[in-house]
Image (spheres, rainbow, N blue to C red):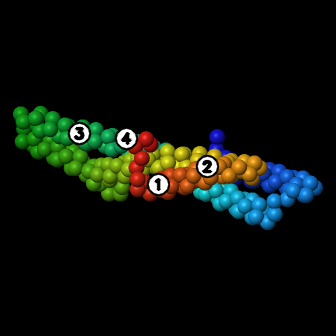
Amino acid sequence: MTMDAAEVRELIDEAHERELEKRRAESDHGDGHGPAAHSVKTSTAIYISVLAAALAIVSVAGSNAGKDMMASAVEASDDFAYFQAKTQRQISLRLAADELDLLSAGLPADAQARASQRAADYRGQADRMDSEGGKNGRTDLLSRAKAAEARRDHAAAQDPYFDFAEGMLQIAIVLASVFVITNFGFILWTSRLLAVAGLLMAADGFTLALPLPFL
């Protein structure tokens, strides 16, 4: 489940309230931990806030990658379908021109001339389909479809990196919040390791500089 900004804020507020209650209880019993403990808690709160900001960025990047993948897949499918339709029309025109040439062989000269003119018109229409004006020629359609496929594949390659990064950052935030309550150092270090791994995974998702074999 994705952790949104509101849930992160509630988690931080809850941890902060528990810490305040703990300090009040320790103050009542004369068992305060002094400025050093307060500094650790403050730095941890800042650390959690930074992780929350990073999580928001990664979440948006992952969402955008998913949207780009879907939009590019639809665009590639539409362009390829249009390209195939034009190809079939082009083949039909050329077959019709060839058929006219064959059928006109035994016709009178004037009929042969008309048939030859019609066949030439068909071949001209077929040739114009490759690079007709505007952006709907077969060459343009094929180029656009391949570009859309490249964007789709790029977004599909990015998406799992962002998913793993988001999960690691969420767990890091939860562990850091648990540290605020329990004050167990190994929990904070585990959170930091996961945070570093998540940030590296996110950076690799943006750049795809180091493809990972399991993604």
Closer to us: mark 1 or mark 3? 1
User: Which callout, 3 or 4, points at the residue further toward the start of the chain?
Assistant: 4
Bin the neighbour count of mark 1 within 10 Å (Cα to Cα): few under 14, some 14-19, many 20 and up.
some
Q: Give yes or no for contact between labels 2 and 3 (Cβ–Cβ under 8 Å).
A: no
- Verify CB contact (< 8 Å) between mark 3 and mark 4: no
- Mark nearest the camera among 2 and 3 is 2
Q: Which of marks 2 and 3 is nearer the N terminus?
A: 3
Q: Report the side of 127 relative to 76 (left or right).
A: left
Q: What residue type is labelled 2?
A: Thr
Distance between the Cα atoms at labels 1 and 4? 34 Å
Q: Which mark is residue 204?
A: 1
Residue at image position (51%, 55%) is 200
In terms of sequence position, does the residue under pointer 1 or pointer 4 come before the other? 4
The disc labelled 1 sits on which kind of residue? Asp
Which label was assigned to residue 24?
A: none
| Residue at screen point 53% across, 52% down | 197
Is there a contact, CB below 8 Å, between mark 1 and mark 4?
A: no
Q: What residue type is labelled 4?
A: Ala
Q: Position of residue 146 (x, y in %)?
A: 34, 49
| Spot occupied by residue 51 in the image (x, y as percentages of width and height) | 64, 56
Q: Is mark 4 on a helix, strand or loop?
A: helix
Q: Position of residue 188 (x, y in %)?
A: 66, 52
Residue density around tag 2, few if under 14, some if 14–19, many if 20 or more, within 10 Å = some
Q: Circle 3 sits on which residue?
A: 91
For label 4, the residue is 81
Q: Is mark 3 on a helix, strand or loop?
A: helix
Closer to the observer: label 1 or label 4? 1
Nearest the viewer among 79 and 1 is: 1
Q: Is residue 65 visible?
A: no
